[in-house]
Amino acid sequence: MYRYGYYGIDPTYILVLIGAILCVAASAMVKSTYSKYARVRSMSGMTGAQVATEILRRNGITDVAVVHVPGDLTDHYDPRNHTVNLSDSTYGSTSVAAIGVATHECGHVLQHYKGYIPIKIRTALVPAANIGSKLGLPIIFLGLIIGMTPLARIGIWVFALAVAFQIVTLPVEFDASHRALVMLGDYGFLANDEVALSRKVLTAAALTYVASAASSILQLLRLILVVNGGSRNRR
């Protein structure tokens, strides 16, 4: 039977707690920042959808559609059906926040069309990451329950695939935001002072990916400690 720490209390849960706090704080920050700058109307008066459409046109991309999806901050680019999906808070909004988010998603489009290596790696990792997120923990827990440390360690490697996906996502998101800020200035969608406001929104959004990656790494570290600790306790 696995036991760790004193009085059956697992001290490694502190790692999970730290990860959860980071994610909650990052989520609160992006919502607060977006809400603040969603109330600042851009001088251009263009909506998120109009900006996204114009970016695609200027880059000669004709096979990607800009579509409206429900929800707030559910914006994403789907390379499977070639769509830039803009949420309720972005699609028809003329705010500097909405324009920044729409341009960020177009940054992902340009990554795919220009062969950006990290996004190719992330795309290739999607199947493995899905397996890792669904099967990693069950395999680890099964190995611990039946006392098979090798099985638990296999679970760790499987879970690590999901962590790797989170890590590779970071440069992809940072690069998309960088492309967005360049386009916002070069294409004249926002004035210089407005670009600075949009940067704050994109920076806050990027922190959610940093927090998510950090949380995953801390969870992986905890699992390694748990499995190794359980192995030592059975010796």
Image (cartoon, rainbow, N blue to C red):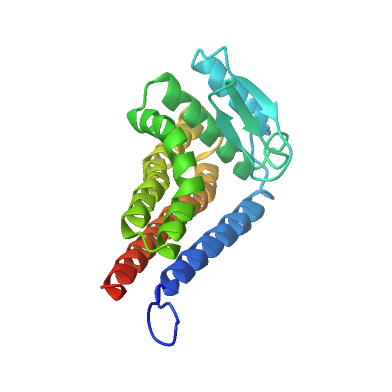
Q: Which residue is found at the position 36% from the left and 68% from the top?
A: 226
Where is the C terminus found, in terms of image quarters?
Answer: bottom left
Vertical arrangement, residue 82 with respect to residue 124, above or below: above
Vertical arrangement, residue 165 with respect to residue 220, above or below: above
Where is the N terminus found, in terms of image quarters?
Answer: bottom left
Asked whether residue 160 appears in the rendered view, the answer is: yes
Residue 76 placement, left or right of 176: right
Query: Residue 125: percent from the left, percent from the top?
Result: 40, 35
- Res 234 quadrant in image: bottom left
In the image, 212 versus 67, the foreground residue is 212
Judged from this view, the residue extending furthest toward the front is 146
Asked whether residue 207 appears in the rendered view, the answer is: no
Question: Across the whole image, how many numbered discs are drawn on residues?
Answer: 0
- Res 65 quadrant in image: top right
Query: Residue 199: percent from the left, percent from the top?
Result: 49, 46
In the image, 196 versus 98, the foreground residue is 98
Query: Residue 8: percent from the left, percent from the top?
Result: 44, 82
Query: Residue 53: percent from the left, percent from the top?
Result: 61, 22
Residue 184 placement, left or right of 49: left
Q: Which residue is found at the position 65% from the left and 34% from the top?
A: 86
